[in-house]
Image: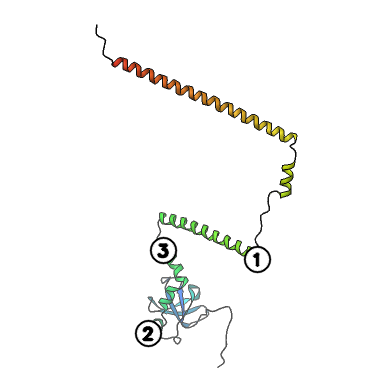
C-alpha cells in the first residue's frame, strides 16, 4: 500500500475518529466523534461521554475540530468511550480557543445591563491603552528606520535677528499706540472701581458706627433729676 504525504492547506478531514461539534438539532453544542462515513453527506457519530447517542447526522450539522482519536471504523460504543478517555478529549477541548469563545458567549447571555455597561467601559479603557502602545511602538520603529525627525523652528535665527534689527514701521507704531491707549483706559477703569469700592466700604463703616451709637444710647439708663 502506497502512503501519501499530504501537506496541503486542509488539516481537518471527515474521517473515522474525527471529533466534531454538533451545530443543529437536539444535541446542539455537544461533542461527538465520527464512527463511519455513510455517504457524501451523512456520517455516523457517537458521543458516549457527552450524551450523544449513536446516530446518523448530516455534514452540514457538524463542525470539524482539530481533535482526533484513534479507533477502527464502525467500532462499538465501548471502544469509542475508551479511545475518548485515552485521548483526553474533554481536557484538550476545554483548553482550546474555540471552547473559551463558546464559554464567553454563554457568559455574555447572562449579563445584566450594569454588567454590560462595565464591560463597555473596560473595553474603551483597553482600546485607549492599546492605541497608545501601538503609536509609541510605531514611532520608535520609524525613528530607528529613518532617524528621528527634528522639528523645524518657526523662524530661522537670521530672520529673528533681522526682525529685531528692523526699524518699526508705521503699522507697528500704530499698533503700539493702540495698545498703550487700551492699557491707559484699563488703568482708569481699575482706578475708578478701586475708589468706588473704598467709598462703599467707608459708607458701610459709618453706618455701623451710627447704629452702634444709637443702640448704646437706647440701652443707657435715664439721667437722674
The local secondary structure at tag 1 comes to helix
On the image, numbered disc 2 is attached to which residue? 78
Q: In this view, does 165 lie to the left or right of 2?
A: right
* Residue 107 location (% of width, % of height): 41, 63
The local secondary structure at tag 2 comes to helix
On the image, numbered disc 3 is attached to which residue? 107
Q: Which residue is drawn at 71% across and 33% down?
A: 173
On the image, numbered disc 1 is attached to which residue? 145
How far apart marks 3 and 1 lie (CA) works out to 45 Å
The local secondary structure at tag 3 comes to helix
* Among the 4 quarters of the image, the one containing residue 164: top right
Quadrant placement of the C terminus:
top left
Against 33, is 194 above or below?
above
Does the image show residue 213? yes
How far apart marks 1 and 2 lie (CA) works out to 63 Å
Camera-side residue of 49 and 211: 211
Which comes sooner in the sequence, label 3 or label 1? Answer: 3
Amino acid at each position: 500500500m502506497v502512503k501519501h504525504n499530504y501537506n496541503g492547506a486542509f488539516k481537518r478531514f471527515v474521517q473515522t475518529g474525527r471529533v466534531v461539534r454538533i451545530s443543529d438539532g437536539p444535541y446542539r453544542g455537544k461533542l461527538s466523534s465520527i464512527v463511519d462515513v455513510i455517504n457524501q453527506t451523512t456520517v455516523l457519530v457517537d458521543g458516549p461521554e457527552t450524551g450523544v447517542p449513536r446516530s446518523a447526522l448530516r455534514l452540514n450539522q457538524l463542525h470539524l475540530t482539530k481533535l482526533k482519536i484513534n479507533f477502527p471504523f464502525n467500532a462499538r460504543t465501548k471502544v469509542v468511550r475508551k479511545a475518548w478517555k485515552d485521548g483526553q478529549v474533554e481536557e484538550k477541548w476545554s483548553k482550546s480557543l474555540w471552547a473559551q469563545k463558546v464559554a464567553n458567549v454563554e457568559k455574555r447571555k447572562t449579563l445584566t445591563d450594569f454588567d454590560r455597561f462595565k464591560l463597555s467601559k473596560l473595553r474603551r479603557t483597553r482600546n485607549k491603552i492599546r492605541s497608545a502602545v501601538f503609536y509609541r511602538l510605531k514611532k520608535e520603529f520609524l525613528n530607528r528606520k529613518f532617524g528621528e525627525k527634528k522639528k523645524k523652528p518657526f523662524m530661522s535665527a537670521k530672520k529673528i535677528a533681522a526682525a529685531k534689527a528692523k526699524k518699526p514701521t508705521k503699522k507697528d507704531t500704530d499698533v503700539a499706540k493702540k495698545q498703550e491707549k487700551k492699557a491707559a483706559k484699563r488703568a482708569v477703569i481699575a482706578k475708578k472701581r478701586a475708589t468706588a469700592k473704598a467709598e462703599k466700604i467707608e459708607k458701610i463703616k459709618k453706618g455701623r458706627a451710627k447704629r452702634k451709637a444709637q443702640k448704646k444710647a437706647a440701652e443707657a439708663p435715664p439721667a437722674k433729676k
